[in-house]
């Protein structure tokens, strides 16, 4: 009898990272069920997969019970608005998908005896007072500020994930994702990468918030996906930072966008959003040691690829 193909469920599978994960698993010979309610996901991201017999998709809000027929081997919970602009626009759905959605996705993993991976975030560190951030750092989050809807939902999601591991013995993984960029980001999601690229493409001024001295460390999506797959099949249950440790100020990043884009754009300064973290850089020692993973794509290289994708795919 032919061996059954492994079945992977990806919640948020029509989003930026979720859709790249669907691609990766289909290419690696898995069957994939993508679940998305399309509030920030887009069918365009999975259009090329729709005819593949190993791919299925369901429009569903995972804050409500998730029903899947047949065996499931892995559940990856990626559903959530993920950009500050999006989670400010959808504060309650963000809280619900991080809490109820994670509960439901864990319930599915428990029922099917599947391994479970939670997409967590560097936002659990808030405006960090430890730099770079190690997984052992507890964070510095404002629970009642506007970003709290995302940060606290993800912190709850981590707590319930580890409770399911400890109490129900589910094989859980938690990836703390740092700023990631690449093809299929939504041009209007408000994050710095699509904003600057859109502005540069249209010779509009690049909007640097605050002084631009705040830092971020940008990881190309392909490096992140590789790290996630390695983590999924590892023996680690607690959180693991996956990100690129090359840290840039936002002003440096704006200048890099100007360099790669052949634009007439200038830089203008706008108000810094509330609770915008002043610095962010992952300590990736754990991933290097236990997953034998390290990012390969330099920011300039990834930015050139992302820029041309936006030029070809976005009006
Ligand atoms: N940012 C900016 N201009 C923009 C969008 C964002 O200067 O048009 C800044 C933002 O204030 C933050 C950094 O870029 O300091 C990264 O913001 P993003 O929204 O991409 O993600 P975050 O890391 O804050 O979740």
Image (cartoon, rainbow, N blue to C red):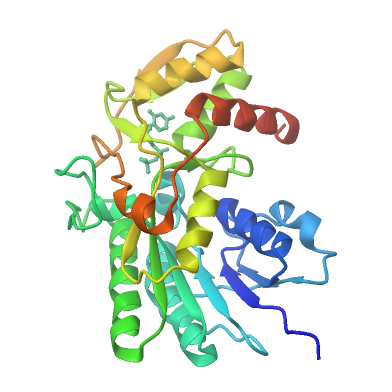
160 lies above or below 220? below
Q: Residue at the spot x=29%, y=89% of the render?
A: 167
* Left or right of 159 on screen, residue 110: right
Expressed as whole percent of the image width and height from the top left, the position of residue 19 reads 64, 56
Give 245 or 140, whichever is nearer the viewer. 245
Q: In the picture, residue 46 is in which quadrant?
A: bottom right
Expressed as whole percent of the image width and height from the top left, the position of residue 261 reads 59, 16
Expressed as whole percent of the image width and height from the top left, the position of residue 63 reads 48, 76
* Left or right of 251 on screen, residue 47: right
Q: In the picture, residue 216 is in which quadrant?
A: top left
| Quadrant into which the C terminus falls | top right
Q: In the picture, residue 204 is in which quadrant?
A: top right
Give 42 or 181, whichever is nearer the viewer. 181
300 lies above or below 292? above
Q: Ligand 1 appears in which quadrant?
A: top left
Q: Residue furthest right?
A: 51
Q: Residue at the spot x=49%, y=58% of the render?
A: 228
* Left or right of 314 on screen, residue 74: left
Give 21 or 83, whichever is nearer the viewer. 21
52 lies above or below 248? below
Expressed as whole percent of the image width and height from the top left, the position of residue 103 reads 41, 80
Q: Residue at the spot x=21%, y=57% of the render?
A: 144
């Amino acid at each position: 009898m032919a061996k059954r193909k492994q079945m992977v469920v990806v919640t948020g599978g029509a989003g930026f990272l979720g859709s790249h994960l669907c691609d990766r698993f289909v290419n690696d010979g898995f069957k994939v069920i993508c679940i998305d309610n399309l509030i920030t996901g887009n069918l365009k991201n999975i259009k090329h997969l729709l005819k593949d017999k190993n791919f299925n998709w369901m429009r569903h809000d995972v804050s409500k019970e998730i029903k899947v027929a047949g065996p499931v081997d892995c559940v990856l919970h990626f559903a959530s608005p993920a950009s500050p602009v999006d989670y400010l626009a959808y504060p309650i759905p963000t809280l619900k998908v991080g809490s109820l959605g994670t509960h439901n996705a864990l319930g599915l993993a428990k029922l099917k005896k599947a391994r479970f991976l939670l997409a967590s975030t560097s936002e659990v560190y808030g405006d960090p007072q430890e730099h770079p951030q190690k997984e052992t750092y507890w964070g510095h989050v404002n629970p009642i500020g506007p970003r709290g809807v995302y940060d606290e939902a993800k912190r709850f999601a981590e707590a319930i994930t580890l409770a399911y591991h400890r109490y129900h013995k589910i094989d859980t993984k938690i990836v703390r994702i740092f700023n990631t960029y690449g093809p299929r980001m939504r041009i209007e999601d408000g994050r710095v990468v699509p904003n600057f690229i859109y502005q540069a493409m249209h010779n509009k001024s690049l909007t640097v918030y605050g002084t631009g001295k705040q830092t971020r460390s940008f990881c190309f999506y392909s490096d992140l996906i590789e790290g996630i797959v390695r983590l999924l099949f590892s023996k680690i249950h607690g959180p693991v930072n996956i990100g690129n440790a090359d840290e840039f100020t936002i002003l440096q990043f704006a200048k890099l966008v100007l360099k790669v884009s052949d634009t007439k754009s200038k830089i203008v300064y706008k108000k810094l959003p509330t609770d915008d973290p002043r610095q962010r850089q992952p300590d990736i020692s754990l991933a290097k040691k236990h997953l034998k993973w390290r990012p390969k794509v330099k920011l300039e290289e990834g930015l050139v690829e992302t820029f041309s994708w936006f030029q070809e795919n976005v009006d």
